[in-house]
């Protein structure tokens, strides 16, 4: 467990790690309240928001290979 914590400290700062979560909430909110997206089921809206947020997080904060 201690090795995991050391690896986390070397990675991106904790505040930036929460960016995909906050972005997912920001994407999911219009999916919920905009009438255009009412044709989508709740699960599809949630998965879509999660995929958009993770792609944005991966694009904005790419990991460098440890080769």
Image (cartoon, rainbow, N blue to C red):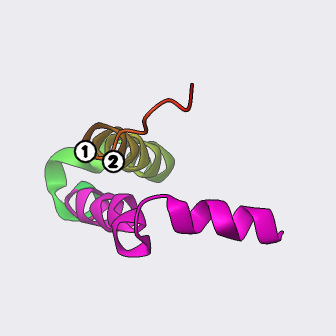
The region drawn magenta spans 1-30
Mark 2 → mark 1, Cα distance in angstroms:
5 Å
Q: Where is 32 relative to 5, above or below?
A: above
Foreground of the two, 44 or 16? 16
x, y percent for residue 37: 24, 46
x, y percent for residue 25: 32, 66
Residue drawn at (73%, 63%), measured in percent from left and top?
A: 4
x, y percent for residue 65: 49, 29
Q: Where is 24 relative to 56, above or below?
A: below
The residue carrying mark 1 is 60
For this orientation, the residue located farthest to the top is 67
Q: Where is 4 relative to 36, above or below?
A: below
Foreground of the two, 35 or 1? 1
> Badges 2 and 1: C-beta atoms under 8 Å apart?
yes
Q: Main secondary structure of the magenta part?
A: helix
Q: Is residue 62 magenta?
A: no
The residue carrying mark 2 is 57
Residue drawn at (57%, 24%), measured in percent from left and top?
A: 67
| Horizontal side, residue 22 vs residue 6: left or right | left
Residue drawn at (36%, 40%), measured in percent from left and top?
A: 58
């Amino acid at each position: 467990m201690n090795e995991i914590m050391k690896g986390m400290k070397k990675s991106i700062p904790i505040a930036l790690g929460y960016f995909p979560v906050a972005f997912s909430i920001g994407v999911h909110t219009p999916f919920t309240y905009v009438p255009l997206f009412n044709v989508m089921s709740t699960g599809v809206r949630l998965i879509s928001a999660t995929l958009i947020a993770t792609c944005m997080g991966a694009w904005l904060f790419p990991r460098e290979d440890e080769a």
